């Protein structure tokens, strides 16, 4: 099959949605398909109000010029009837888009109720209608993880016949490095000097408010706990008390390269995953594979990973003192076989073939 996998962000492994498209395309090529990951970027002159419409037009133009494709795989907001008329159209999720929109609007209105916030809400409503239209047009709607699949099936029962599911995974080359960290991680008791790590963009969906509440409660109790917030960009500084930063309790790493991740993981004792709404949360798998215990909210990949990490994956908030987890055997329990891009591509292929039939 000739398959186009559309990524809205530029096609670079530094960006989560693009990384998924790159890994899936490479695995599909290993299965003999002509699969390519492609992005409509750069879109010169696009604004936050027009970006999604410009992306739609660029994808349609690309398919008209470079097609035909047997399968066009795109986020739901870009899944149009015009694309569906030419190919098997797959609306593949990289995040629960409607829930992201809703949470973003609520956060915006609470933070700064203003005419601009109202305009954001109106724009979000228009995008929401486009997302639902994309699901309607698609022949296959692929949810990311079991949690999103269950939520979609419950909310849109009329589309259950075309709902599918896929999972994400750490790239194979990076996995080897993380598993090496896992084998050398010293066992220790996590008490008042725990060095926590939080990875992700600084946005409402990532549970930043919950993280700040958690830190405020723990820092008030004294002790030497600290946290590194990495990948957060420049905006985290405005929300974090200066005393935490000046006193060394909180360290900010606005950005990091992929090759810098192992050192970050190795320098910490435990991870925090506070997302309110999450697509998958690759950082969660990265921390777990490196041998960190992770205290996590029930979001994203947590239900799918918990059976494989019964000791390492723990509920929020962290206990006052807890022992290092008994590290799971990831080969024996089937994790490495299940969360492998070749296996994921095989499952994807089977669902697409069924949808085409």
Image: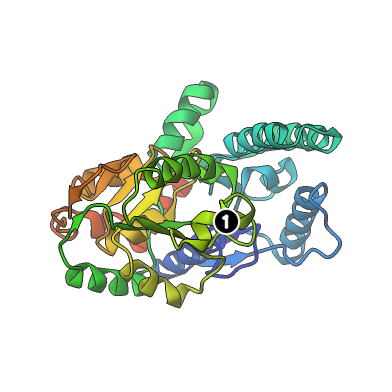
Question: Label 1 belongs to which residue?
Answer: 242
Q: In this view, does 20 lie above or below 185?
A: above
Q: Which residue is drawn at 78% across and 38% down?
A: 120
Q: In this view, does 175 lie above or below 168?
A: below
Residue 59 visible in rendering: yes
Number of callouts: 1
* Location of residue 140 in the rendering, given as x and y in whole percent from the top left corner: 53, 41
- The colouring scheme, among rainbow, by chain, secondary structure or one colour, is rainbow
User: Callout 1: helix, strand or loop?
Assistant: helix
Q: In this view, does 339 lie above or below 175?
A: above
**Toward which corner of the image does residue 171 lie, by quadrant?**
bottom left
Q: Which of 23 and 255 is in front in this view?
A: 255
Residue 230 visible in rendering: no
* Location of residue 44 in the rendering, given as x and y in whole percent from the top left corner: 83, 65
* Location of residue 81 in the rendering, given as x and y in whole percent from the top left corner: 72, 41
**Toward which corner of the image does residue 79 lie, by quadrant?**
top right
Q: Is residue 61 above or below residue 274?
A: below
Q: Nearer the viewer, residue 186 or 153?
A: 186
């Amino acid at each position: 099959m000739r398959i186009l996998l559309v990524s809205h962000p530029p096609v670079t492994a530094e960006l989560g949605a693009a990384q998924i498209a790159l890994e899936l395309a490479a695995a599909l090529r290993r299965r003999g398909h002509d699969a390519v990951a492609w992005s409509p970027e750069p879109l010169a002159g696009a604004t936050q109000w027009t970006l999604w419409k410009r992306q739609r037009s660029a994808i349609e133009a690309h398919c008209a010029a470079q097609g035909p494709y047997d399968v066009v795989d795109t986020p739901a907001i870009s899944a149009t009837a015009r694309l569906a008329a030419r190919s098997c159209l797959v609306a593949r999720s990289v995040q629960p888009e409607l829930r992201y929109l809703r949470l973003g609007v609520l956060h915006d209105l609470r933070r700064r109720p203003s005419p601009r916030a109202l305009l954001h809400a109106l724009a979000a409503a228009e995008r929401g209608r486009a997302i639902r239209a994309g699901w309607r047009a698609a022949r296959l709607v692929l949810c990311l993880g079991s949690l999103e699949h269950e939520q979609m099936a419950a909310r849109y029962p009329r589309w259950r016949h075309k709902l599918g599911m896929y999972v994400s995974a750490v790239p194979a080359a990076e996995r080897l490095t993380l598993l090496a960290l896992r084998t050398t991680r010293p066992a220790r008791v996590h008490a008042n000097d725990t060095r926590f790590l939080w990875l992700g963009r600084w946005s409402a969906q990532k549970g930043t408010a919950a993280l700040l509440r958690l830190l405020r409660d723990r820092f008030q109790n004294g002790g030497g706990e600290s946290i590194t917030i990495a990948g957060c960009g420049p905006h985290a500084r405005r929300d974090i008390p200066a005393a935490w930063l000046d006193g060394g309790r909180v360290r900010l790493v606005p950005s990091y390269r992929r090759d810098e991740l192992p050192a970050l993981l190795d320098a910490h004792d435990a991870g925090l995953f506070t997302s309110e709404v999450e697509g998958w949360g690759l950082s969660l798998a990265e921390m777990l594979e490196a041998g960190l215990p992770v205290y996590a909210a029930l979001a994203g990949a947590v239900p799918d990973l918990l059976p494989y990490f019964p000791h390492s994956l723990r509920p929020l908030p962290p206990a006052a003192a807890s022992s290092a987890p008994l590290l799971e055997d990831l080969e024996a329990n089937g994790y490495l076989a299940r969360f492998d891009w070749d296996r994921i591509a095989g499952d994807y292929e089977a669902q697409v073939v069924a949808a085409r039939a």
